[in-house]
Amino acid sequence: MKNLYINTRFFFSLIGVGIVYVLAFFFPVMMWVAHILLILCFLAVMVDYLLLFNQKNALLAQRILPEKLSNGDENFVKIDIKNNYGFKISTKIIDEIPFQFQKRDFLITQNIEPGRNTYFQYSLEPKKRGEYSFGNLNVYASSPLGFVAKRFNFQKDVMLPAYPSFVHLRKYELMALQSEFMLGGIKKVRKLGHTMEFEQIKEYVPGDDIRTINWKATSKTNRLMVNQFQDEKSQRIFILIDKGRTMKMPFNGLSLLDYSINAAMALSHIILKKGDRAGMMTFSKKTENKVAAENKSGQLKKISEALYNIKTDFFESDFNRLYQDVKYSLNQRSLVLLFTNFETLDGLNRQLKYLRGIAKNHLLVVVFFKNSELQTLIHKNPESMQEIYDEVIAEKFEFEKKLIIQELWKYGIYTVYTLPENLNIDVINKYLEIKARGIL
């Protein structure tokens, strides 16, 4: 009986019978009609009950989940329902989705023909990494009579992890394997000079660069020979992610830390596909989640696992500790991309000596963020005195960000200053530009 539920049609029927009983006070002949309607109503309920509860495995349902959720992306959950009844049923599906999504009005209605399967799906967009627990998949089935419904429960307590964004990795991979990066905002970069690794010596053909002629090989073979080069590979690219309090600021539901982690995943995928070595670490009061720079088959999975459940904290990040760990961990010149956020020039100056120390031995790129809300204020036409004040203050903060870029450039430190939603493309562009210019 715990799976028996009364539908609204039963209550409307009782209301109708009650109205007939009221009329019977004025028209006594209606009393027998009321009695007959009441008996028919309860008979219909009994028949409806027997139709729904007289058959085992009358309804089968399955929730089809992805292996893992992609943070910040649209993830689809499929539901498959099969009707084993001998009649058409109407169903109400209530899936107990994880509380993090705060969807308290989830309801799907569906009519299913006898002996047929029905497939449908809905989407979820997680905003945090971690574990998401699904409860029961509840299906309420009603017969054509519609007086009562039977509840079916399926797949209780299923846990699904949410990993850093991986949905768009294939798109970035296709871009990285092309010779021209013109799609999705990725820019074409002209290669300069001879920043190449030696590959082989081959015979000269018209069109080869005469500056690559190998005179020693030419004299031995009595034929004009040239050196052939290939793109330099196996360079070390190291990603540093600040998880201090400045990275907790949210934009469009995702924190700056989550944007940085998603960009680190996309960039690591490109780095590995380009033949370089990708590594990473996070830091706040101390450095954690270290992954050595390698180019092995399981490297991207290692990075994903390291980034899976990282949380921000409310501490001031210790750049001195970061400098010491980078100094002893990276013993070869590497490209170091530092994801952090500086809001003021004073905030930068407190950490500048440590950034300069890293830049002495490595090519350092500091990645920090534009405030999209300030950008809206700057480009808004003010209509009141308060809006003018807001615009002036926003422009002051934006000017200070530009001073930060100039201060870093003064010491040979490259920067990526971007909106959070454009972070993936802009970071990949900077990596490709550095590769093309051969400045590593």
Image (cartoon, grey):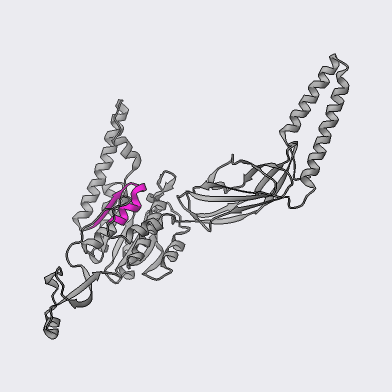
Would you identify the image quadrant in which residue 38 lies?
top right
Q: Residue 290, relative to residue 12: is it above or below?
A: below
Is 58 in the magenta? no
Along the viewing direction, whichever of 114 and 133 lies nearer the viewer: 114
> Dividing the picture into quarters, in which one does residue 110 lie?
top right
- Give me the residue at 53% from left, 58% from top: 67
Check if residue 428 falls in the magenta segment.
Answer: yes
Residue 148 in picture, x, y percent from top left: 75, 38
Q: Is residue 66 left or right of residue 118?
A: left
Q: Quadrant of the C terminus?
A: bottom left
* Vertical position of residue 316 compared to residue 148: above or below: below
Q: Residue at x 33, y 68 (%)?
A: 275
Residue 281 placement, left or right of 108: left
Query: Looking at the image, how many numbered discs can be counted on the residues?
Result: 0
Q: Is residue 401 visible?
A: yes
Q: Residue 142 at x, y = what percent?
A: 72, 41
* Nearer to the camera, 239 or 163: 163
Q: Is residue 356 visible?
A: no
Give the image location of residue 409, x and y in percent.
Answer: 21, 54
Q: Quadrant of residue 23?
A: top right
**Residue 369: x and y, percent?**
32, 48
Find the magenta span and give its range: 413-429
Residue located at (22% from left, 64% from top): 438
Quarter of the image where the N terminus is located: top right
Residue farthest bottom in this picture: 220
Which residue is found at the position 73% from the left and 40% from the top?
143
Q: Is residue 313 left or right of residue 416?
A: right
